[in-house]
Amino acid sequence: MSLRFHEIAEGRHRILNPLTDDKLDLLGEICRIAPGTRQLDLACGKGELLSRWAADYGAQGVGVDISQVFLSAARARAQELRVADRLAFVEADAATYEATPESFDIVSCIGATWIGGGLKGTLSLMRRHLRQDGIALVGECYWISPPPPEAYETYGMEKDLFTSLAGTNERIEEAGFELLEMVLADPDSWDRYVASQWWTISDWLRDNPADPDAPGMRDFLTQARRSHLEYGRDYLGWGVFVLRPQ
């Protein structure tokens, strides 16, 4: 899925993952954020997490993303919540972003572990930015139960890309982290994230029938509906895992 496809499909979203507003708030409570906490959010999307926590807890932060569309929305949201003076949004590749080593209290990557080629690689990228007593927040899919073989083909993913919830913890431990807490999506929050994209894409297709990306977006919409309805709601979970270096 191309970057532009993401920008179109998530055009009406503020939170670019299956976290609902209440679960994003719960995650903030769990993380025990204090005024002045410094956070780095890799692949930050529209910056809702950073802006909300800056407004609610007095945190400071840096968001990194490659999408100018998402970063523009992030800066607007920070202005709306009157926290723009506490946040910086940087257009860069999150996988190669350089900052002072071990300079952040929280490092997050919520649902974009492709930046490190998977969960363990992404945790390695995150760790170099994290203070020794800091916490990492990583969003990742997992299999609720083993899916049928055709599910992998429908999603267009390698069989070992994700694992079970227990297997996810094993990968976390192999990367040198301890699992402290987690906030998991449920079928309703998955629906709000995935199914709400269908209407957004359908409207875009009606408004842009001659766009060169229209055939690809139409195929994506068909595939997105099928994968979620046939397999996603029964087999695919997603959560944010709160971690600390071992």
Image: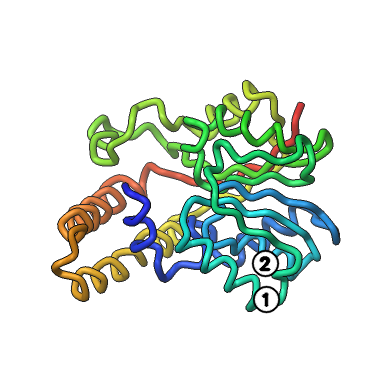
Q: In which quarter of the image is residue 160?
A: top left
User: Residue 167: image x %, image y %?
Assistant: 53, 27
In the picture of the structure, the residue carrying the numbered disc 2 is 52
Camera-nearest residue between 5 and 90:
90
Rendered view: 43 above or below 98 = below
Q: How crowded is mark 1: few (under 14 residues within 10 Å), some or many (20 or more)?
A: few
Q: Determine whether the residue tagged by mark 1 lies in a helix, strand or loop.
A: loop
The disc at residue 147 is none
Q: From the viewer's perspective, is residue 177 above or below residue 11?
A: above
Which of the 4 quarters of the picture holds residue 171?
top right
Residue under label 1: 81
Q: Residues within 10 Å of mark 2 (few under 14, many from 20)?
A: many
Would residue 116 appear left or right of 149 to someone viewing this image? right
In which image quadrant can residue 105 be found?
top right
Return the residue found at the far top. Answer: 174
Q: At 59% across and 45% down in the image, what residue appears?
A: 109
The residue type indicated by label 2 comes to Arg
Identity of the residue drawn at 49% across and 55% down:
17
Q: Where is residue 206 in the image (x, y as percent from the top left)?
A: 19, 74
At 70% from the left and 70% from the top, the residue drawn is 84
Instruction: Say whether disc 1 or disc 2 marks the residue closer to the N-terminus.
Output: 2
Q: At 28% across and 33% down in the image, what residue appears?
A: 148
Q: What residue type is labelled 1?
A: Leu
Secondary element under disc 2, as helix, strand or loop, is helix
Front residue of this view, candidates 25 and 7: 7
Question: What percent of the width, then of the height, locates residue 41?
Answer: 63, 50
Residue 23 vs residue 113, the one in the foreground: 113
Q: Are circles 1 and 2 on residues that touch, CB within 8 Å?
A: yes
